[in-house]
Amino acid sequence: DTAVSQTPKYLVTQMGNDKSIKCEQNLGHDTMYWYKQDSKKFLKIMFSYNNKELIINETVPNRFSPKSPDKAHLNLHINSLELGDSAVYFCASSPRGTGEQFFGPGTRLTVL
Amino acid sequence: SQQGEEDPQALSIQEGENATMNCSYKTSINNLQWYRQNSGRGLVHLILIRSNEREKHSGRLRVTLDTSKKSSSLLITASRAADTASYFCATAMDSSYKLIFGSGTRLLVRP
């Protein structure tokens, strides 16, 4: 019954590997987001989808590719992982464009 | 570049005291939101104030917005140990879906 869920919660991997993080929301929201929070707690938007359509694509390396199979799911695939990709990645959703956002618990990615 | 800067970066108070956090931003906004993040958790929405509003209350929270100074403040009254968390302001510009987060204030409420 968790509103926004992410899997896995922790991800430890070697440099150069490819990994995916999954996100699902059961709130019926149209818009979903991926954020990256670095070690200094700075939170930055990466991508946003509205009804499966990409609407925000910040300056993110093209090794990061979001995929939205339906409006309840937004996955993040990362190719050729680098040390600098280590961070906590948060998924979020919102019912309206400029309204409150509901965040998942985060995925802590550690690249060794 | 980052839209919001928060002040102070860290705040330590005694239970029962009030806590005030400030946020400044750079461009015109549609609304400003405050979020709380407990250690190791996701962010939780606290309150949203629109650009045409000056003050808003929610329980022990009071938010003010001064668009002429491009600043907002969050006041938590009668703080509790459970209020210990990081607090972030976030701004939404015009009708954009994008939220720009501030740098956060780490609040410690000592029992």
Image (tube, coloured by chain):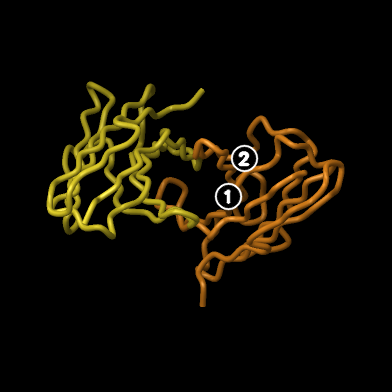
Chain colours: A orange, B yellow
Q: How crowded is the residue under tag 2: few (<14 C-alpha within 10 Å), some, or many (20+)?
A: many
Q: Which chain carries label 1?
A: A
Q: Is residue A92 rendered to the left or right of residue B79? A: right
Disc 2 + disc 1, Cβ < 8 Å? yes
The three-letter amino acid code for the residue at tag 1 is Tyr
> Which residue is under mark 2?
A46
Choose between A1 and A97: the one closer to the eye: A1
Quadrant (top left/top right/bottom left/bottom right) for the C terminus of chain B: bottom left
What kind of element bears circle 2? strand
Give me the disc on residue B5.
Answer: none
In percent of width and height, residue A97 lies at 47, 48
Across and down, in percent, residue A107 comes to: 62, 55
Q: Is mark 1 on a helix, strand or loop?
A: strand
The residue depicted at 39 percent of the width and 39 percent of the height is: B90
Find residue B53 and report its image quarter.
top left
Q: In which quarter of the image is residue A45?
A: top right
Q: Report the disc number at residue A33.
A: 1
